[in-house]
Image (tube, rainbow, N blue to C red):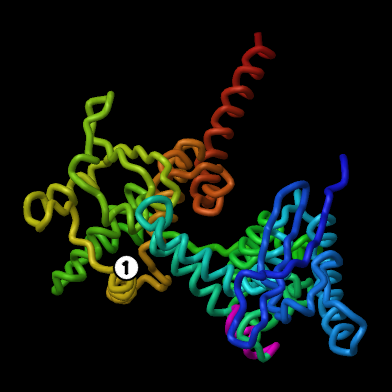
Amino acid sequence: MSKSTFKILFYLRKNQVNKDGKASIMIRLSVNGEVSQFSSKLEIEPKLWDTKLGKAAGNSMNARQFNNLMDDIRTSLRNHYHEIENHEAYVNAEKVRNAFLGYSIRQNTLLELFRSHNEDARKLIGISKTEATLSKYDRACRRLEEYLKAQYKVTDIALKEIDHKFVTGFETYLRTVSKCNENTTAKFIQTFRMIIIVAKNNGWIFKDPFSNYKIRLKRVDRGYLTDLEIQQIIEKKFVSSRLEYVRDVFIFSCFTGLAYIDVKQLTPNQICTSFDGKQWIMTHRQKTDTNVNVPLLNIPLAILKKYEGKLPNGQLLPILSNQKLNSYLKEIADLCGINKNITFHLARHTFATTTTLSKGVPIETVSKMLGHTNIKTTQIYARVVNEKISVDMQILSDKLDNMEKFAQNKQEL
């Protein structure tokens, strides 16, 4: 690969003289024939400029000082050129000029990049991003801002200054000052690492501060409801209509596996008659934009029938905000004597474990209905419960009994 040609030329802008009788010294950079011109911010009287040599004329103290300033500029430009040439895919005159003028340095800071990334994500809401995703990005950005102020007493930091110590320090800050648990900390770090990857991909940093760092996510058993607990909630008579609404929507999700946002956005045209002549939900997950096809069992069909034509704006179910839903579900758990932290998302875990897997539905089928692209994700939701083990082992036992009887009969013949 041939080396780039790099030239620096200083010249006087003679056609523009200010009121002090001085003209600007301009810089012309040339890299492989590409030219960029800009002001050096230096000025001189035209009569004191040596056009042929491209510097101040004479050997006076002022001329020497002026030429020394130009030499410093020349050295700085060469240093920027070599740094770009050594670390980036290609070098051009505009890159060298921007580096010298400080444009790239000013822009290439952590929080500035993070905020720019978040603004881009904001424009994609409803297209490829959700409000929840943007909130996650914004929270991570705020945590980094707080960390910089607390630990470094600065409002931002150059991307090139971020190292392994910065990453581990941020983890410690999250665990101690912010009081985040292990998984919340790991998710903040994951989002931070995503910004570092953006910086690397753009050539703004060359060393990965995460190269010797492992993000640790602790597997958490979020629980599920048993058949008995589901039955308790279904049969409970509530005085308050709001609790009845919440119960119905929650039970609907227990038997369909839909996440809150997907239940909220469910429309009549997503309830279809499928190839088997039965009613199915045919939609796609907002979070991952994957297709979700779920046959409607009798219980969710009955819930849909209950509210048919009774809700405004074509709503199928009486949906409250997720925050209110979760608050009322805790009230429902207390009234039903269920000592579990019930949230709406627990319905999705219940569908995976109690409604499907423990009843013999293969995990591949469960994964498809949940809209997962990776079966490992489904394994977080679906547990092999003792009841399922008992049923499976009883089937095995029956097969072994038949085998033993067959073997015994053969011996008797």
Q: Is residue 86 above or below residue 411?
A: below
Identify the residue at the far right of this view: 59
- Locate residue 361, reporting x and y percent: 45, 38
Q: Is residue 268 above or below residue 260?
A: above
Which stretch is magenta? Answer: 144-152
Residue placed most toward the observer, 154 or 125: 154
Identify the secondary structure beneath mark 1: helix
Q: Is residue 29 left or right of residue 366?
A: right
Is residue 151 on the magenta stretch?
Answer: yes
Residue type marked 1: Asn
Is residue 248 on the magenta stretch?
Answer: no
- Figure label count: 1
Q: Is residue 121 left or right of residue 265?
A: right
What residue is rendered at 41% in x and 73% in y? 339
Identify the residue at the far left of this view: 309
Main SS of the magenta part reads helix
User: Which image quarter holds the N terminus?
Assistant: top right
The quarter of the picture where residue 129 lies is bottom left
Residue placed most toward the observer, 116 or 52: 52
The quarter of the picture where residue 322 lies is bottom left
The quarter of the picture where residue 45 lies is bottom right
Per the image, the residue denoted by label 1 is 322
